């Protein structure tokens, strides 16, 4: 399906991530211990939102009502917002992001932002870098009852730009972004210049990886071109022909389909075999060789030749 909207994360995707999150988490833990929660319940390695989940469960189990939790949550998020605003004053835009946003808008795509940041800190960033007019919708943590990876966060963004999950792309630098996208079957693009490694992003469900925001332009242009070609082929092909086309699968000596036969039929082309040579090295670095059969062959061309890499493709990914 043609891409009609792009949903962006903020920190680490559009702006450089420079939040002093460890100090922020330490202060939140300190506050929660003063409210009677054991320090051992929390860790500096978990987000403030994960801490709040534990607090909610603990308060519910002890008979506290929703109003009491909401008041505590409000105080905790106010502490976090203080650090977000400090970070917003010293951050900078990711190189290439302005050009990318401008081009996507010129190409008539709807753009949205979904971030765990507060509305106040997000607006500060959008005002500072003159980005407000770039987005058709902005969904902060203040706009939703649950933040990513809960799907309601992304679902809200999709509703605001009025597109179906299959018509959108999510772009982010964290596992949360990838997991949220996969939850709703939205094509997930992980950026390798943020807080997560390529391995972490692919394990979390990234369909594609890009090393620069400008790579996104080419990726969308090519996926939309291939989607258009696929629709044209399906339209011109007769119903009977479509029904009889089946992939030719030969079995290896062990009785299992060979990779080349499964992906390209019983007689893979020279190009297909050439592309297959890149699979072992790519997947050994990603740590998961069991998913080779679900990839799109074109996606294994080196990242340097296209600017992006699509290790695991969905129905709208590039195909031969």
Image (cartoon, rainbow, N blue to C red):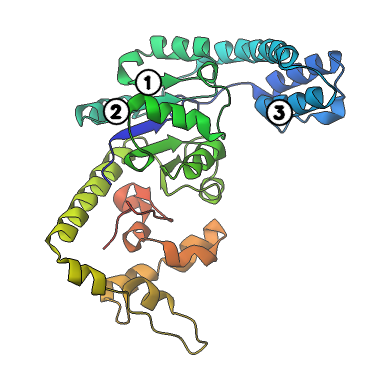
Residue receiving disc 2: 110
Can residue 94 be seen in this snapshot? no
Tell me the quarter of the picture where residue 35 sits: top right
CA distance separating discs 2 and 1: 9 Å
Compared with 62, 67 (above or below) is above
CA distance separating discs 3 and 1: 27 Å
Query: On residue 53, which mark appears?
Result: 3
Compared with 316, 294 (above or below) is below
Q: Earlier in the sequence, mark 2 or mark 3?
A: 3
Compared with 279, 98 (above or below) is above
**Position of residue 23 measured from the top left corner of the image (x, y, whole percent):** 71, 20
* Picture quarter with the C terminus: bottom left
Tell me the quarter of the picture where residue 157 sits: top left
CA distance separating discs 2 and 3: 33 Å
Q: Residue at x 55, y 61 (%)?
A: 288
**Position of residue 259 measured from the top left corner of the image (x, y, whole percent):** 42, 75
Q: Are marks 2 and 1 in contact (CB under 8 Å)?
A: yes
Compared with 203, 88 (above or below) is above
- Number of other residues with Cα within 10 Å of mark 3, as a class: few under 14, some 14 to 19, many 20 or more: few
Residue receiving disc 1: 137
Q: Residue at x 37, y 60 (%)?
A: 300
């Amino acid at each position: 399906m043609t891409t009609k909207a792009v949903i962006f994360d903020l920190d680490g995707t559009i702006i450089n991530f420079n939040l002093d999150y460890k100090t922020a988490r330490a202060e939140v833990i300190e506050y929660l211990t003063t409210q009677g929660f054991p320090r051992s319940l929390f860790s500096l390695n978990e987000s403030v939102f994960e801490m709040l989940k534990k607090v909610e469960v603990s308060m519910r189990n002890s008979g506290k009502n929703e109003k009491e939790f909401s008041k505590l949550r409000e105080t905790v998020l106010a502490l976090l917002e203080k650090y977000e605003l400090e970070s917003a004053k010293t951050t900078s835009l990711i190189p290439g992001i302005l050009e990318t946003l401008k081009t996507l808008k010129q190409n008539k795509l709807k753009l949205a932002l979904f971030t765990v940041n507060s509305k106040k800190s997000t607006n500060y960033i959008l005002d500072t870098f003159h980005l407000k007019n770039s987005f058709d919708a902005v969904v902060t943590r203040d706009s939703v009852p649950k933040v990513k990876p809960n799907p309601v966060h992304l679902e809200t963004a999709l509703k605001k730009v009025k597109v179906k999950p299959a018509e959108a792309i999510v772009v982010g630098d964290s596992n949360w972004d990838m997991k949220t996208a996969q939850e709703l079957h939205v094509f997930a693009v992980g950026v390798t210049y943020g807080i997560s490694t390529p391995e972490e992003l692919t394990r979390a469900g990234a369909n594609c990886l890009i090393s620069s925001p400008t790579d996104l332009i080419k990726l969308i242009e090519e996926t939309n071109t291939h989607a258009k070609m696929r629709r044209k082929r399906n339209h011109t092909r007769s119903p009977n022909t479509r029904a009889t086309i089946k992939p030719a699968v030969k079995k290896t000596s062990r009785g299992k389909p060979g990779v080349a036969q499964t992906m390209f039929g019983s007689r893979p082309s020279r190009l297909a075999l050439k592309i297959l040579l890149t699979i072992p090295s790519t997947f050994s670095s990603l740590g998961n060789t069991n998913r080779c059969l679900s990839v799109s062959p074109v996606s294994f061309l080196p990242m340097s030749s296209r600017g992006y890499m699509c290790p695991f493709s969905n129905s709208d990914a590039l195909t031969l």
